[in-house]
Structures are given as structure tokens and as C-alpha cells.
Amino acid sequence: MPHGTAPLETGAAREAPREAPGDDPSSEVTPGAGTVGASAAGASAVGASAVATSAEELGRPATIRDVAALARVSHQTVHRYLQGYEGIRPATRERVAEALEALEYRPNLTARSLTTGRSMRIGALTHELDQFGPSKIIQGAAQAARDAGYVLDILSLDMGDPEEIDQALQTVTQHDLAGVLALASTDHMAQAFGAANFRVPAFLAGEEDEFASHHPSQLTAVGFPALIDHLAELGHQRLLHVAGPTAWSAARNRARAFETAVAAHGLVSVGVVHGDWTARSGYEAISALPARLDFTAVVVANDQMALGALLALRERGMRVPEDVSVTGVDDIPDAAYFSPPLTTLRVDFVAQGRRAVEHLLAGIAQREPADDEALISQLVVRRSTGTAPSSGT
């Protein structure tokens, strides 16, 4: 399966519901008065005093008719809104949205499945949920699925166990799903997901190898240059990179972005050492270096490894940032509380997860997805970077 949305194996697209003559999909119900338009059929007038304005006041799960009463519309209009119907006046749409939120309306997915004849569940295959990036991507995916009325079933895999991966793929194909979201960070997982026959719409979400795709992300095209700009302005000339594992496309992309940005500034890369995204691996990578360090800045591929690098430098008698500056990538919540607080590139992984689900939903609906940027980053300057020392370390 190529990167993107897999071919659909569903029937013909369902025709949008037609309005009966004179049936205005935005027709309103005025409390205490008659209804307006043909949609008044089946919609009784509701006294203002009988209308619940909050979930607490209602005291039970809200129904479509409760939402309709609060929004002063017919229950058919609420139904059309929930189905994504576009022919509703903006003011009416806003009232319906506000009523849904006020009453904390939650759709009955079982009833919807029976009515529409399709599943409201999405299967998500992922791995390494103990890592910050994958966990935040899943968080964003779950939010987007929930907002669209779907449930995200998450299956975390051991990427080092081929048998477990095969079993997981078989399990997914046996369930009644609307679609499958395959979140692949490593080459092995991307190959396994790409070769799978999910039999439902699927989207392979993962950071592409930019050397192969020739499509740099904002993180590598803008974020890393901004990070190296910052270090160059501080007078740093010789930089070391602590990269992630080579089997991860994200690690390769970040390493190439580092080398490209360093070369563009006429600076010197003294080399690349590798970790596995953990703080321990960052600590070990720095600890294993020769006794004499010939760099004044360390650009680390993620914040967790930067945490380990900070400790290793301190144990080697190096002060940060007086003797050497250290930067990370991701801006995990703890990065602001490292010692010293870490300069890093903030990456919006939640948005990446939401984008992946939106692409899958576009495949399910047989429409083109929005063309947007997957990896957005922002330089966050803290106290782990400072002016380069006058002489090398």
C-alpha cells in the first residue's frame, strides 16, 4: 500500500438526502409558537421554560430532540448537521454547535451503525507509545476521531516481533471497521503496513524519508535552519549531532537537516553519534566520546536524549551553556525544567495525529483530503544555549 489513502472497497457513494419541497434544512422552531416551514411536521413547539440549557439541568444523556429544542430548530436539522450536511445557514449551524456542546451530546454509535449500515470504529496500529512523539500523535488521532463521531481502537505492537505484527494485522482485518490508521515510524513497520491488505480504507501515517520523497517538512526545511541560525548567532562554529536510530525515518531526516543547515552556514559538523531516543542512550553517546571534546554545541535529535547528554556533559566537567550549548527537538513538557532549561524545537505531534485521521476520513468519504503541513515546528530558546566560549573545549 503506498503512502496515503488505500483504494476504497466500499459500494457506490450514498446520495445526499434530498429535501422535500418546501423543507428548509435550517428551519427553526420558535419556543411557545408554531414552527416555520415544512419541517414543522413531527416537531412540536416547546415552551421556553421546558428547555434544558445544560447537561446538569437535563440530568440524563441528551437526545437529538433536546439539542433541537435548545437550538430552536427541528430535530431533522440537528440530524443533518451531525451527518455533515452543508446546506444549513451559518447562524443555524452555530446554534446547533453551541447546543451540542452545552448539553454534552454524545451520538449513539450503535444506533448510528444500525441506521447507516457502516461501522463507526477506526483501528489504529502503532508502536513505541512510551516515546513522546508516537504517544502525542495517537492523542491527536483519538481527538480527531472522537470529534468526527468515531471510536479509535488502538493496538500497540512490538516492532521487534514479526509474529506479533502478523497476528495484529490478521486481527484488524477480522473486525468490522470503517478504516485503519497505520502509524509507522520505522522502515520495518512501514513495509509491514504497506504490504497489508486491510480490505477497508486505510491511511499509512508516518514521517516520510525526505531523501526518497524529495518533500521536506517544515521541521527540516524551516525548524532546523532556525536552530542552527540561533547557534551561529551565538558564535558556535563546531557542532556535534546526537541522532536517533537509523531505522527511523525521522532520525534520518533530522540528521540530514542538521548537516545541511550546518553546511549552509559554513560551520563544521564534527560528527554524528547515535542513540535510541532514550535519555540513557543520550548519556551513553556523550560519555563514550574521547576525552578531549572539539565542539562547542550539541544538537540532539530529541529532548529525552538531550536530558542524558546534559548529565554526561556535567559529569565530564563541562558547564552548560558556559562551555557547551545543548539543544533538543520536540519540546516535551519536562524540557522547560531540565537543568538548565532546554532550548529546543517544539513539534506539534497532536496536529500530526489529527491530520492523519482527517486523511483517513477523506478516504472513507471518497473525497480529496485537505493539503496541509504535517510537521510544524517552532524554536523555543531557553538557558541551555549561550555564547560560544572564546576558545574550543
Image (cartoon, rainbow, N blue to C red):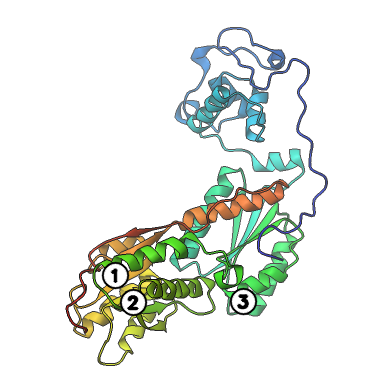
Whether pointer 2 and pointer 1 mark residues with C-beta atoms closer than 8 Å, the reply is yes
Counting from the top left corner in percent of width and height, residue 383 is at: 22, 65
- Which residue is at 60% across, 68% downward? 213
Counting from the top left corner in percent of width and height, residue 1 is at: 72, 66
Does residue 103 lie above or below 344 as drawn? above
N-terminal label among 2 and 3: 3
Query: What amino acid type should be assigned to the residue bearing mark 1?
Result: Ala
Q: Which residue is mark 1?
A: 232
Can residue 354 be seen?
A: yes
Q: Which residue is mark 2?
A: 267
Does residue 338 lie above or below 89 as drawn? below
**Mark number displayed over residue 373:** none
Of the two numbered discs 1 and 3 in the rendering, the one whose residue sits closer to the viewer = 1
Query: What amino acid type should be assigned to the residue bearing mark 3?
Result: His
N-terminal label among 2 and 1: 1
Q: Nearer the viewer, residue 312 or 259?
A: 259
N-terminal label among 1 and 3: 3
Query: What amino acid type should be assigned to the residue bearing mark 2?
Result: Leu
Q: Estimate the spatial distance between the alpha carbons at disc 2 and disc 1, rounded to whole Å.
A: 8 Å
Secondary-structure class at tag 1: helix
Horizontal side, residue 240 vs residue 367: left or right: left
